[in-house]
Amino acid sequence: MIEHIHTIQYGSVLIDYDLSFQERKNLTIKVYPDCSVKIIAPYNTPLQKIEKQIKKKAPWIIKQQREFLSYQPLTPPRLYVNGETHLYLGRQYKLRIEMGNKNEVKLFRGRIIVFCKEQKSVKEILNKWYSEKAFVHFEEVLNKTLLLFKKYNIIKPELYIRSMEKRWGSCTPNGKIILNSELIKAPKGSIEYVIVHELCHLIHYNHTKAFYDLQESIMLDWKKWKERLERILS
C-alpha cells in the first residue's frame, strides 16, 4: 500500500487527506475523530478523478470534522491568586496559597490549598497535581467503562493525557485514546461521557446513526452530561 499526503481546497476550507492505493474496485473516504481524512483508491486512479470525488463529498467531510470538534473546551484564563475559584471533578474550590518548605496540594473544606516555596510556582504545582489526579481517575473510569463494551471485544486502548485546545478527547485508528487534562475539572458523569464517546469511535469512526445508537445504548443520559461539561467549563 502506497500513501501520500495531499491538500484540496473547497471554498475557503483546506482539506488535508492521506491518499492510499489498494487492490480494490471503489474509492472510500473516512473521517476519523482526530479530524484526519483518509482516502483509499484503486490502483492507477487518476488524481483528478480522486479530487473530483473529494469535492463532491466535501460538505459531508467538513460536517464530520465540525461534529468531532463540537464539544471543545473554553476555559477562561486563571491568575492563580488567593480567593480565585478552581474546579475539580465538577466542584468549585477557592484557591488558598500557603508558603512552606515543600510543594504540595490539598483539598480542605471547600478550598484547594497550594503549599509552595515560591509564589511564582503555584500554577506549575497545581497543574502537576491536576495531571496526577487525571491519570488515576481517567484510568479507573476507562477500566469501568470498558466492561460496558464487553460484547464488542475491544482491546483496552492506550490512554494518553495531554493539554488540548480544541477538544475534550480523541482517538486514533490504531486504538489510542487521548483525553484533555482539563477534563479532570468536569463532573464524573461528564468524564465518563467523554470516555464512552471515544470508545464508541473505536467501533464507528464517524458520527453516524449507528454511532449515536451505540452511545445511547451504553449511556442513556449522555446528553445531560455533555451539556454539563459544556456549561461548567465554558
Image: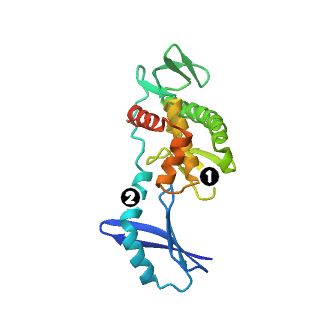
Report whether residue 109 is seen.
Answer: yes
Give the crowd class for mark 1: few <14, some 14-19, many >=20 residues within 10 Å. Answer: some
State whether residue 32 is above or below residue 21: above
Three-letter code, disc 1: Lys
Residue sticking out furthest to the left: 11
Pointer 2: what residue? 63
Identified at 42% across, 24% down, the residue is 85
| Quadrant in the picture for residue 143 | top right
Q: Is residue 37 visible?
A: no
Residue lying at 41% horizontally and 19% vertically, measured from the top left: 83
**Image x and y of residue 185, in percent:** 49, 31
Residue occupied by mark 1 = 176
Q: Of marks 1 and 2, which one's residue comes earlier in the chain?
A: 2
Q: Is residue 104 above or below residue 14?
A: above
The Cα atoms of the two marked residues, 1 and 2, are separated by 23 Å
Q: Is residue 18 above or below residue 174?
A: below
Q: Amino acid at mark 2?
A: Lys
Question: Circle 2 sits in a helix, a strand or a loop, which is it?
Answer: helix
Q: Nearer the viewer, residue 227 or 136?
A: 227
Left or right: where 218 falls relative to 16: right
Q: Quadrant of the N terminus?
A: bottom right
What residue is drawn where x is 62% and y is 39%? 145
Q: Is residue 52 left or right of residue 182?
A: left
Q: How is the model colour-coded?
A: rainbow
Q: Position of residue 6 (x, y in %)?
A: 46, 73
Assign a secondary structure to mark 1: strand
Pointers 1 and 2 in contact (CB under 8 A)?
no
The one nearer the camera, 98 or 14, is: 14
Q: Nearer the viewer, residue 77 or 173?
A: 173
Q: Is residue 130 above or below residue 164?
A: above
Looking at the rendered image, the disc whose residue lies closer to the viewer, 1 or 2, is 2
Q: x, y (%) of residue 233?
A: 41, 34
